Amino acid sequence: MTTTRKLSGRARKAVLLVHVLSAAAWLGIDLALGILVVVALSTSDVNTAGVAIQAVDIFAIWPMFGASVICMISGVVLGVGSKYGLVRYWWVAVKLVVNVGMSLLIVFALRPGMAEAARIGERMTAGDPAAVLPGNLMGPVVVAPTLLLVAYVLSVFKPWGRIRRSAKPVQRQRRDLVGAV
C-alpha cells in the first residue's frame, strides 16, 4: 500500500494562494495581450498599430509563460499533496492537460507568431507601406482566455467525478430470508 504525503493546512493554503494568483496573473496578461491585439487590428493609425503589436512581443510572452509554469507547478503540488491527486479526478486531469497544452502553445506557437508580428510592427512604425499585420492574431486572443475560464469553472464546480473506480469490489452482505427464520 502506497501512502501519499498530504500537505498541512497552512502549506496547502499557501500553495493554493500561489496557484490562484498565478492563474489570475496568467488571465490578466492574456487579456492585456487581447486588448493590444484588438487595438493593433482595429486602429487606422499605423504607428499605434505598430507599437501595440510590438508591446505584445515585449511584455506578454515570457511573463505569460512564467505564470503558466508557476500555475502548473503549484497545481501539481496541490494535486500530489491533497485528496484530489493528479489523475484521480477528471476535472484535475483536464486542467493539467489544458495547462500543459497552453504552456507549450505559448512557447512553440504564440511566441514565434508574435515575434513575426512585432517585426511587421517595427516596419509599420518605420513607415513601410507594405507592412500589414496578419489577420490570424485574433485566434489566441479568443481561445486562451476561454480555456483559462474553463479551467476556473472546473476548479469551482469539480464535475465528472473519479477517473476510475476503486479496484476493490464492494462486498455486499447477503441476507437470506431462510436463514433469518
Image (cartoon, grey):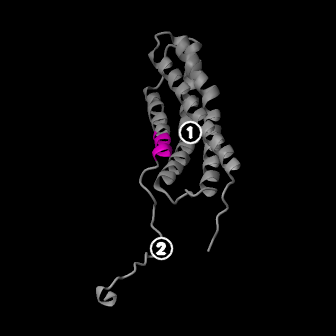
Helix, strand, or loop for circle 2?
loop
Q: Is 58 above or below relative to 47?
A: below
Residue sitting at x 45%, y 45%: 157
Residue bearing the label numbered 1:
106
| Mark sitting earlier along the chain (2/1) | 1
Three-letter amino acid code at the position of disc 1: Ile
Residue bearing the label numbered 2:
167
Q: Is residue 18 left or right of residue 104?
A: right
Q: Is 91 above or below relative to 171?
A: above
Residue sitting at x 51%, y 52%: 92
Q: Position of residue 23 (x, y in %)?
A: 58, 38
Q: For mark 1, does the 10 Å Cα neighbourhood hold few (<14), some (14 to 19), or many (20 or more) residues?
A: many
In the rendered image, the residue lying farthest to the top is 45
Q: Which residues are magenta?
A: 150-157
Q: Nearer the viewer, residue 179 or 81?
A: 179
In the rendered image, residue 154 lying in the magenta stretch gets the answer yes
